[in-house]
Amino acid sequence: MKLLNPVAYYHVNTSNKGDWAIKKSITEAILRHIEVPFSYFSVKNDELTEERIINQINTDCSALIIAGSGLYTNYPKSSGWYFPCKTELFKKIKVPIILIGLGCNQNLKGNILTKGLNKNTEKSIKLINDLAAVSTVRDARTYELLKNLNITKHELQLDPGNFLKVKEKQTKRKRVAIQLAQHAPILGRYDGGKEGQLNREKNINNFSNISNYLIGNGYSIVFIAHDALEQSIAMDIKKSSPKIEVLNTDNLDEMLSEYSSCRFSIGMKMHSNIMSFASGTPFLSLYYDVKTTEYLKMINYKSFGESVFINYYTPIFDKVKYMMKHWKLHTNNFRMIKKEKSNSFNNTIKKVCKIIKDNS
């Protein structure tokens, strides 16, 4: 068997399990078709210099993959977006450039990730797409953003995390998964001030009340952390709802298995919703960024989300009562949507595999 050249893989490498989910989905899908090693680089820390391009990427690699997350967003990186490479160096990259599942973040509230793209950032994004052999985006808003930059060859697909395989599917029990976020100042991070702490307290109270209602109706509740530091908010919920279980693990297969055992989930992070979808479990979404509303549109599910910044308790509580009765319907719908949408993702993966083989 021919030894294929490594793939240089740039991605968001943080403690956020959603970023891990994207990487897992893409790399496992590729490895189902071909045996190829990956060399992982962080968009946060690993600058793609001219020296690295010429003496490493072009000489040692079969392709450059830039994958997942809201990379098409203003960031203090040398490109102007969340890719650490000067725009003028893009044309020096001689291996095929592959862009998979990229998006553009825009928080609904707060003082970060709220502005439109800078002009130089737009020029950089257009150039990388003009040079790319493959380009997919995760939502219609990002698709239109690129279209308005006169980019024409990008494709619209669900976020790669939606196509994760559940290795140990569980029989659905009378069980609900919950997830709360506190990674941003406005959501109650240590530097969020009074407004952030008030939002955090509101979320704890609301989730505690909903959990106690479900427990009173015979359900078990599991908090699935999507960042290790969510453990503190999970423990604060347990003060008012002590029967809640907590899963805080780096094992994504265990997380997916846990989601698959639940009748439905309630989550704030988009990839809590996405991993629930991937496991065939309906979810209720409490969103803080337009990326989630765009995701809900993609699966025709917009009525099952509410902004975390409003008085959401009553509408979410009503949706909980609805889902207690109708979870089977939406489980079946999710499975059909995943099967239908997977064709496009699988075709992209096959195209990527051919590119890797042809350039090794």
Image (tube, rainbow, N blue to C red):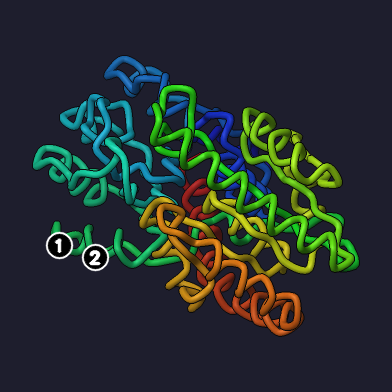
Percent across and percent down for residue 210 are 69, 59
Under mark 1, the amino acid is Asn
Residue at the spot x=21%, y=35% of the render?
Answer: 91
Q: Is residue 261 visible?
A: no
Residue at the spot x=43%, y=72% of the render?
Answer: 297
Please name whichever residue, 107 or 102, is drawn nearer the observer in this view of the structure.
Answer: 107
Q: Classify mark 2: helix, strand or loop.
A: helix
**How many discs appear?**
2
Left or right: 228 in relation to 78 = right
Q: Which residue is mark 1?
A: 148
Please name whichever residue, 172 or 211, is drawn nearer the observer in this view of the structure.
Answer: 211
Q: Which mark is residue 144?
A: 2
Q: Classify mark 1: helix, strand or loop.
A: loop
Quadrant assignment, res 81: top left
The answer to the question of whether label 1 and label 2 lie on touching residues, with beta carbons closer than 8 A, is: yes
Quadrant assignment, res 181: top right
Which residue reaches farthest top?
Answer: 51
Q: Is residue 317 visible?
A: yes
Residue at the spot x=35%, y=53% of the render?
Answer: 133
Left or right: 322 in relation to 351 = right
Label 2 environment density (alpha carbons within 10 Å; few <14, some 14–19, many ≥20)? some
